[in-house]
Image: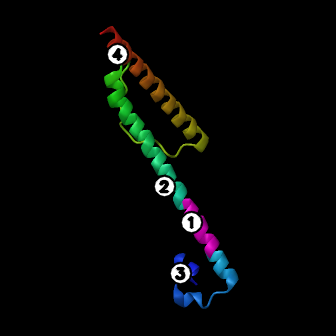
Amino acid sequence: MPYAISIGVDLGAFWGLTPRSLHIIAQGYDIALKRHINVQNAMAHLQGVYICEALESTVGNRLSDKTSKKHKYPDEPYDLNLDGKKAEREQESQLQLFAANLNAAMNNFNLSKEQG
């Protein structure tokens, strides 16, 4: 009974359920919970991508040399209706580009610091 209550089964409905129907409700609850966790995980990942964009367009631009092309923060949100694999490749390439730009900016910064 405590498990049934923890997954949202009403106490009055609990007494009319069979063990099989309670098991099906529990499976549905597990599926919904996994879906919720996946959505939260995707949102956290997307937030990280936006944070990387913000860092690259502020700190990355500040640390880069004057001849480097400046990064501009996106004017619009990313299109989330892309095919999953295409979206993954796009995000991965954007993160790799950010890492390369940040690495180049840090190298330029260190070089200018060494030169005085």
Q: Amino acid at mark 4?
A: Asp
Is residue 51 depicted above or below 11 in this figure? above
Question: For the residue labelled by badge 2, is the local secondary structure a helix, a strand or a loop?
Answer: helix
Q: Which residues are magenta?
A: 26-35
Residue 20 falls in image quadrant: bottom right
Measure the C-alpha gap from mark 2 to mark 4: 38 Å
**In x, y percent, where is residue 18?**
67, 86
Q: Residues within 10 Å of mark 1 (few under 14, many from 20)?
A: few
Q: Which one is earlier in the sequence, the residue at label 2 or at label 3?
A: 3
Check the image and name the residue furthest to the top: 115
**In x, y percent, where is residue 84?**
59, 44
Q: Which mark is residue 40?
A: 2
Q: State the residue position of label 1.
A: 32
Q: Is residue 91 magenta?
A: no
Is residue 22 depicted above or below 81 in this figure? below
| Image position of 3 (left or right of 21) | left
Measure the C-alpha gap from mark 1 to mark 2: 12 Å
Q: Which one is earlier in the sequence, the residue at label 4 or at label 3?
A: 3
Q: Which mark is residue 65?
A: 4
Q: Which one is earlier in the sequence, the residue at label 1 or at label 3?
A: 3
